[in-house]
Image (spheres, rainbow, N blue to C red):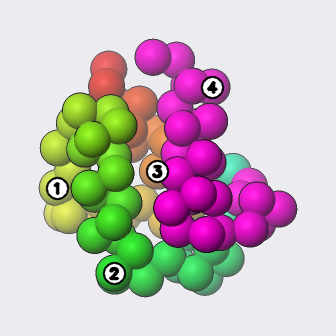
Amino acid sequence: MDRKEIEAKVRNFMIEDLEIDEEKIAPDALLKKDLGIDSLDFIDIVVIVEKTFEVKIKSEEMAGVKTFSAFCDYLESKLG
């Protein structure tokens, strides 16, 4: 799966499942501040990502992930 596919899938579930406005989703958008993702949303994200991408997410690995782009980087590295 290439980077564009990863970004498209992440963008899609953020819009559909987390009900984030599409206009807010930019590469440098901060997950918490700009996109309003909270700890409950994070649980949803883990479930969605594990189903969609068939990878396990560890919370300690996600600690430094602050932006949409960094989140996609993280997924890209897991799918490597």
User: Marks 2/4: CA distance?
Assistant: 27 Å
Which residue is pictured at 22% across the width and 36% down the height?
Answer: 55
Q: Which residue is mark 4?
A: 4
Secondary structure type for disc 2: helix
Q: Which residue is mark 2?
A: 40
Q: Give the left or right position of residue 39, taking residue 36 as reference.
A: left
Mark 2 and mark 1 in contact (Cβ < 8 Å)?
Answer: no
Q: Earlier in the sequence, mark 2 or mark 4?
A: 4
Q: Which residues are magenta?
A: 1-26
**Residue at the extreme right of the image, as rendered:** 23
- Indicate the quadrant containing the N terminus: top left, top right, bottom left or bottom right: top left
**Residue at the extreme front of the image, as rendered:** 16
Label 4: few (<14), some (14–19) or many (≥20) C-alpha neighbours in 10 Å: few
Q: Earlier in the sequence, mark 2 or mark 3?
A: 2
User: Marks 3/4: CA distance?
Assistant: 13 Å
Q: Which residue is mark 3?
A: 71
